[in-house]
Amino acid sequence: MADEAPLHSNNPIRFGIVGCAEVARKLARAMCLAPGVTLCAIGSRSIEKAEKFAALIGLSGTQVKLYGSYDQVLDDPCVDAVYLPLPTSLHTQWAVKAAHKKKHLLLEKPAALNVAELDRILEACQSNGVQFMDGTMWLHHPRTLKMKNLLSDSKTFGPINYIHSTSTMSVNPEFLETNIRVRPDLDALGALGDLGWYCIGAILWAKDYQLPSTVQALPDVTTNSAGVILSFTASFHWGISSNNSTATIHCSFFANSSMDLAISGSNASIHTKDFIIPYQEDWASFELSCGAQFADLHIGWNVIPEEVRVDCELPQEASMVKEFSRLVHGIARDGVQPNSKWPEISRKTQLVLDAVKKSIDRGCKLVQL
Amino acid sequence: MADEAPLHSNNPIRFGIVGCAEVARKLARAMCLAPGVTLCAIGSRSIEKAEKFAALIGLSGTQVKLYGSYDQVLDDPCVDAVYLPLPTSLHTQWAVKAAHKKKHLLLEKPAALNVAELDRILEACQSNGVQFMDGTMWLHHPRTLKMKNLLSDSKTFGPINYIHSTSTMSVNPEFLETNIRVRPDLDALGALGDLGWYCIGAILWAKDYQLPSTVQALPDVTTNSAGVILSFTASFHWGISSNNSTATIHCSFFANSSMDLAISGSNASIHTKDFIIPYQEDWASFELSCGAQFADLHIGWNVIPEEVRVDCELPQEASMVKEFSRLVHGIARDGVQPNSKWPEISRKTQLVLDAVKKSIDRGCKLVQL
């Protein structure tokens, strides 16, 4: 059968989904939208769950293989790559297994519970020659590229002084009781892993992935009775040698939804309020302020921020799947090495996340990196 | 002469300006715009300076009394109230003197170098029965009242979790060499006094002037060779008993102009980018987001922030002068006691500002309040 043949240059990348989390519906849709990609298998802990998920996304067992275990997806020779949205505590086990089965790996964020676990995953990917990427979608939005170009124009923007980012949502009492993201056995990092991953990723992105020299949680950490973080604020500092910058982030399960990213340079600043999930799919915007001064007598401003609008051909998660598949194609078709940029981004994000955790665990002490 | 008579009920409040700072031009204009107020005297260190200032604001010596000393303004029985925009290090001396001369006092911010000095000023005002107000203009803008009404509607807004505020400007090298605001003998608080006063005032305003339990500067303080603060970031925490809230502020002379105030509650959030000086005079706006949730599949939002627009009859500094004069009229006409709200606001702002200074001086240690 054609779909059991190894990957050929013009064949689409065949994805398997391992674990039927809510977010997997979004990714399944992305796999339909992204060119050069097909969803070929879905595995859950029971065949009923796999069937239910397939029905939810409008597919039947004749269109996609349904499995009652994760292992069957990994053992299927038709599957080139897996998308793995399992609870974070299961990442290492299944990601390492997937890599050993030579499956390219798109891993939902947070990548791991700590950098030691992530290193096991990355090592397995490297030694098996498979591509690794974590599921941070906003990095693949064209707005992100547009903002990066502005930040990199040192004449217009000037050195970055300050970055501020928030990721908050107001959850209901049921979420606080039962959701995976607050359970110590499943997503022990809580809001730090679920929301903090984005803000930490954003400040590193803004600073071209220079690690901060110090990290400090602020004394407003809220945890549940099991010690899972529900809200926190943290600060980051890059020393003089890396152009004295500071960042602050705030993440919470108790506040009205926000996804702010504000970056301030000496000559300009940008701000977006929906950096993680854009308000709508076909375009997104950010505010740009350049050379703002006050009018005479300080009774107004000479410029007000302008809205920069960026059109979006594909939803950002489809752009992510497309980029991931492009890299997988390169490996399969041209024999190139897996791209190292994406694992490095994940690792640095995890390193800084670990430092915030360490600061929290030590009573909000300053942590050197 | 009529204008030498003591204050009568229907007479306008007669202002004297003590010190011809740049900001005094703005206030002189406000005194023309505010009802029930007249500018009657200008005093500078030399008569030439007073004349030059009068010419700048389009007045001659026949329209306003010009004095070559501050004392002459304070000694003029026609002067009911003084506006005092001198460098901060001169505030105590001249503010106390003004109070002893029974002049109501509108004092430019930062009110004082520390709360001990401010207490001397407030004590002098109290014992002489004169009104005190500091020159924080944005508190008098109708937008501020509109935002406060929203914040106070606990059903709509929910408890305040997080406040973030910035006040930044990008100054030129000359400013850093010579400006009053970076000179240790004139405005020793630098960016903390000039910019931090606003942000600290804003977070206290949001929290109904509940003092934070802890204050901590973050390790990114920049000072000049004389130790004057040029940029800093600080965090503030209100303990569980006052509804576990956090605030962060960032103030800098090195970053593109910003005046952000973002307040986040469990159900709603507001954000304004020009809270200190509105973009224009006749109206101002803020963004309001209520009950923001993500659309199905998290591919968008159910609501995007709405812009709430507030018209403004008078420029905010004229509203401030109007409110100050209303209080002075009450004292002069009806024999009521000076209003205590404004001195209390100034004092709390100064207390928190002092705590930030203390934290900076102690190497960014946590300071209990």
Image (cartoon, coloured by chain):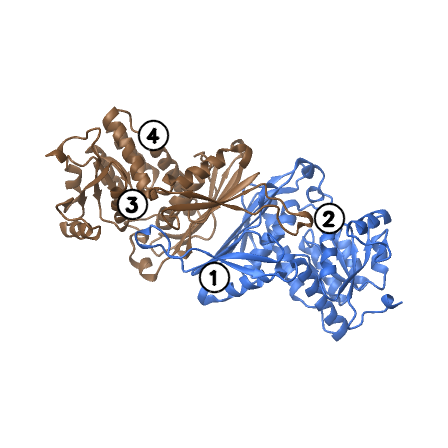
Chain colours: A brown, B blue
| Cα–Cα span, label 4 and label 1 | 45 Å
Please report, as a chain letter, where disc 3 is located.
A
| Cα–Cα span, label 3 and label 4 | 22 Å
Please report, as a chain letter, where disc 1 is located.
B
Q: Is residue A303 visible?
A: yes
The x and y percentages for residue A255 are 42, 57
Picture residue at 54% right of the left edge, 35% below the top: A156
Q: Are marks 3 and 2 in contact (CB under 8 Å)?
A: no
Quadrant (top left/top right/bottom left/bottom right) for the C terminus of chain B: bottom right
* Label 3 vs 4, first from the N-terminus: 3
Please report, as a chain letter, where disc 4 is located.
A
Label 4: how many residues lie within 10 Å, few (<14), some (14-19) or many (20+)?
few
Local secondary structure at mark 1: loop
Label 1: how many residues lie within 10 Å, few (<14), some (14-19) or many (20+)?
few
The residue under label 4 is which amino acid type?
Ser
The residue under label 1 is which amino acid type?
Asn
| Cα–Cα span, label 1 and label 2 | 41 Å
